[in-house]
Image (tube, rainbow, N blue to C red):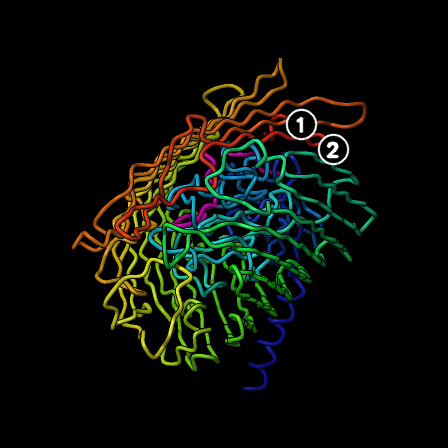
Amino acid sequence: MNHSLLLSFLLAGSFSAMAQATISGKVTDEKGKPVRGATVYLDNTLDGSTSDSIGNFSFTTTETGAQTLMATEVAHENAGLPVTINGDLKDVVLKMKGSSRQLDEVIITAGSFEASDKNKTVLQPLDIVTTAGAQADIVKAIQTLPGTQQQGTQTGLFVRGGDASEAAVIVDGLIAQNAFLSTAPGVAARSRFGAFQFKGISFSSGGYSARYGQALSSVLELNSNDLPDKSTVNLGLNMAGVYASGSKLFKTTSIEATGYYNNLTPFYGIAKTNVDFYDVPKGAGGSTKFTWKPNKDGILKALVNYSRFTSGTRVPNPGDAGSTLDFGLKTQNLYSSLSYRQMLKDKWNLYTAGSYSYNQDDVKWDTMSNVNKDYRAQFRAEAKYYATTRLSILVGGELQHFNYNRTWNTYPAEFTETQVAAFAEMDWSPLHWLAVKPGVRYEHSTLLKQNVVAPRLATGVKVGLYGQVSLAGGMFYQTPDQQYLIANYKNLEMQRSVHYIANYQYMHNDRTLRLEGYYKHYDQLVYEYLTKSFDPNQTRYLDPITMPANNSGHGYATGAELFWRDKKSIKNADYWISYSYIDTRRLYKNYLAESQPDFIANHNLNVVTKYFIEKLQTQINMTYSYATGRPYYNPSNPVFLGDKTPDFHNLSLNINYLTSIRKWFTVVYVGIDNITNQKNVFGYRYANGQRYEMRPALYRSVFIGANFSLTAFDKDEL
């Protein structure tokens, strides 16, 4: 009896298996592009599946005869196709029409501005080079976005209450240890990167991904170009020097090379400077890049970049603000990287990268020599698994090994650090209007003998057809500033910040509106707790015996920001407005009391405009930047950092004229920074009862140049 019953079940199962048919095919839109995440099923049955990232679907059914195959997806109208099932059906194509009420996927935007091929709402490479006042510098252009601070005498990116050390620059997932050119104290330097090196730029002013760490405030992520579209040659001539670049495209590989020579003698020869250059900055450099696509889903990139520069500047004497010292600088920098990315069967995205960088600054302070050397070797590996069209999981790790070595006259000092990190992050969209991104990061510091765990969480909710609300938060750790580590402060731990961010973004018809509020809490900051007097000199000597420090420092930053960009309302025009308000105080380093830092202005405004005149083939760009006064140290004021500088104003103009000289597409450009010659001041020094202004290297400057290329820019890109 039992054997008969078992046999009946086996036979029933066999007949059921024999009756099953497989239905497979692809879901596309009207243009033949794949539709991912579509639900495909037989009408009035439970048989069906979901299309993958390239639109493919497959499922089995026991139904036979005439049926209707259905496809539904939130951004498209429902599609139906009559089918007759007498066996397997292969290569079925379901075409879906776009819905008039199309909903874009949720992209978490809290704390993040992104520019890439998929998101053209913020800054593209041509945006950067055509932004008046930016001088084609990526970081200067980023300073027109909310959350940043205007700088004229300090180098770096200052974001939401953080100083320059709290912002990390990432290139293809790897830390750029020397992201800015070396320069004299009190003279701001530009970044080392050219805008056209990169296809994607992501600026996070807080709450950034668990992929990265060691930055209390911000990450600027740069993703380098893949294979060039074509072989080309570019030549340039301007008041700072000459340059040339070229690329040769083969079937699956390319070779690119650049070379340049800079000499600012012509520029400073006609400009009235606030800094005395007894040896104007000059130098040369070049780079070589090799790219290979072994298959359609893989790419390898190898890059080597080298540069050398010299300069001589008379800088204020730290011991006597009324006198100067000769600061001679010879610097050389090497950066090399190798990366490989491979997509496997539309389910796995694998990425590995490594780099080595070296920098040496030979400094001559009058008669004393100072040699600064550093190097960094690093490796990163990531794997992203696409479980479904709405769920992906990223895991990875990185290894950082770096060294800073300083010899002051005959006194050496150095430190070597090894950092290990592991991270995991999930992108999950359980509903078309909801996205969630939880993440966690583990970091280990060999030098500090410390382990930390930093959880992160971000989420986005669709609001209407074109708006969404995003929230983000998490913990962020960073080792103490290198000046303390190289001075052999042994009892310090990692510093910490906690971010809370709320954001609303509306995007439609080439218009973008962003409103964002945040609160950031600092603790475990390095603080010289026995400080009795304040020394504003950033190159001051540190002694762990006479100036002991611990991690008792703390602070906060809170604010509100607005960003509006409109590329639609005025033909051939593009403009954006960014405004930031910040309230921040901190007790750290050698501060005498909890105060607003001297690099912070409470209100910052930028208005950027661009207009293309078709008949003249000319683009006119203007930028107006405004910031309220920033605190400075007045030794006669009992309130620490209680005085403020005058407000900052800067109106800049940039004109680009497009023409052709034989086969060469030519752009002639003229830039005028600070048209009104505003005497902006970034602080004051005091010595012997006298007050001295901290001024930028130039009040007003005029820059002229021309670029010649075998590849033309479309005016719509400008």
Q: Is residue 353 left or right of residue 571?
A: right
* Residue depicted at x 76% and y 55%: 290
Quick check: 15 above or below 193? below
Q: Amino acid at mark 2?
A: Ser
**Which residue matches tag 1?**
667
Residue 709 marker? 2
| Label 2 Cα neighbours within 10 Å, binned few <14 / some 14-19 / many ≥20 | many
* Residue depicted at x 64% and y 61%: 20
Number of callouts in the render? 2
Quick check: 480 above or below 30? below
Quarter of image, res 298 = bottom right
Secondary structure, mark 1, is strand
Q: Amino acid at mark 1?
A: Val
Along the viewing direction, whichever of 330 and 169 lies nearer the viewer: 330
Residue 297 marker? none
* 635 in the magenta segment: no
Residue sitting at the far top: 615
Q: Is residue 459 left or right of residue 199?
A: left
The part of the chain drawn in magenta is: 95-113
Along the viewing direction, whichever of 356 and 699 lies nearer the viewer: 699
Q: Is residue 636 left or right of residue 199?
A: left
Q: Position of residue 412 (x, y in %)?
A: 52, 76
